[in-house]
Amino acid sequence: MTIPSQGTPDPQAGALLSDRQVRLLRRAIVGMTAILIAGVVLLIGRVIYLVRGSGTQGTAVAQASAVAPALLGDVRLALPAGAEISQVSLSGTRVAVSHSMAGGGAAITILDLATGQVVSRVTIERAR
């Protein structure tokens, strides 16, 4: 004898989620997986970009190569007799040379390495 209520088993009898919820869950998992894969690809691309030295370092190398011939002795700076250099600072293609004068004063000379010309000379005199 068969009991009419026990005919074919209901596929939804023991399920926790409905078919609609399962479809939405699958779509969410596929979407999050795609976002995760895209993030990993972007991360690897960024690492390769930084390792190759692209970006601002490329322009710094180009500037350094443009300045390099001037650093090989092509530029000369004439200082007054008896002057002693106290400090030298490099900024881009310009060099600031601080020096003390023989008479007790000081001066700062700014030299453009690309042209070899003195851009500015500032004389510092002590008040008497």
Image (spheres, grey):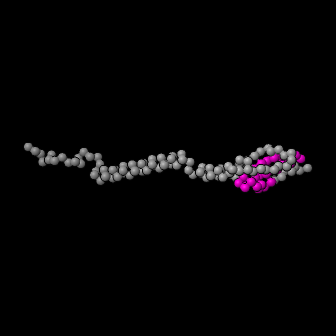
- Total numbered badges shown on the rendered structure: 0
Say which of 78 and 31 sits in front.
78
Q: Is residue 37 left or right of residue 88?
A: left
Say which of 121 and 4 sits in front.
121
Q: Is residue 14 left or right of residue 59?
A: left
111 drawn magenta: yes
Q: Which residues are magenta?
A: 96-121
Task: Indicate the position of residue 86 as horizontal and vertical percent values.
Answer: 79, 44
Task: Indicate the position of residue 115 as horizontal and vertical percent values.
Answer: 72, 55
Q: Residue shown at 77%/48% (left/top)?
A: 97
Q: Residue shown at 54%/45% (left/top)?
A: 51
Q: Is residue 55 left or right of residue 118?
A: left
Residue 119 placement: quadrant: bottom right
114 drawn magenta: yes
* Residue 21 in view here: no
Report the magenta stretch's main SS. Answer: strand
* Residue 37 in view here: yes
Task: Indicate the position of residue 50 as horizontal and vertical percent values.
Answer: 54, 47
Q: Residue shown at 81%/50% (left/top)?
A: 78
Q: Residue shown at 29%/48% (left/top)?
A: 17
Q: Is residue 40 left or right of residue 4?
A: right
Position of the N terminus, as image quadrant, is top left
Q: Residue furthest left?
A: 1
Task: Indicate the position of residue 3 as horizontal and vertical percent values.
Answer: 12, 45
Say which of 48 and 80 sits in front.
80
